[in-house]
Amino acid sequence: MSFNIFDIAGSGMTAQRVKLDTIASNIANVNTTRQPNGAKGAYIKKDVSFRTIYEENINRGYSNFSSNAPDAQFDPKTGNMLINANIALNNGMVTGGVEVDEIYESENAIKTIYDPSHPDADEEGYVDMPNINIVEEMVGMISASRAYEANATVAENVKNMMQTAMNI
């Protein structure tokens, strides 16, 4: 029994969640002028790229449903939910969808502003700041949020169609 539509919608939701997390990190660090170790250096903006999965079987760890677990478990490494329903769907293999290909640092990561009162200003009064445009990040967040919702709606509609078909 194949449930590719759930793989596709689930992989889309997982990818968009990663994109939302990355955007949230960018927004949270819009004014960060120090590295995590405390050294001077602006936060480098992150971007996400996706890769399409074309009917290649990729083992993603836990399957959506499995007969070998006593209760529901979440695998944070893959983003999958393991639910004991005494059936195994797709044997834990993704046969279509999308996945995060890479989270990479933006090439235009730093802008320099003049602010001699800033504690991280150099001798001439210039500060390296992250090159993060809040408007672009918010547009990306809305886009990713709507894509996530669309994938969730697809999964919900397919579930409802399957329930209706079983009631016939």
Image (cartoon, rainbow, N blue to C red):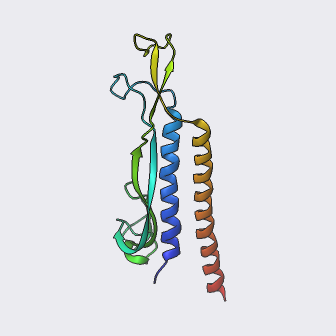
Q: Say if residue 10 shows up in the picture.
A: yes
Task: Pick the residue in front: 37 or 54.
Answer: 54
Vertical arrangement, residue 30 with respect to residue 126, above or below: below
Give the percent coordinates (x, y) of residue 112: 47, 24
What residue sits 37% from the left and 22% below the top?
A: 40
Front position in the image: 78 or 110: 110
Left of 124 or right of it: where is 30?
A: right
Name the one closer to the observer, 72 or 2: 2
* Image coordinates for residue 19, horizontal then vertical, percent: 50, 50
**Which quadrant would the C terminus be assigned to in this image?**
bottom right
* Residue 72, image x, y percentages: 45, 62
Q: Residue furthest bottom?
A: 168
* Residue 159 shown left or right of residue 102 in the figure: right
Q: Is residue 88 visible?
A: no
- The quarter in which the N terminus is drawn is bottom left
Residue found at x 37% / y 74%: 56
Quarter holding residue 127: top left
Total marks shown come to 0
x, y percentage for residue 124? 43, 11
Depicted 16 relative to depicted 88: above or below: above
In the foreground, 34 or 91? 34
Residue at 51% in and 71% down: 6
The residue lying at 38 percent from left, 76 percent from top is 91
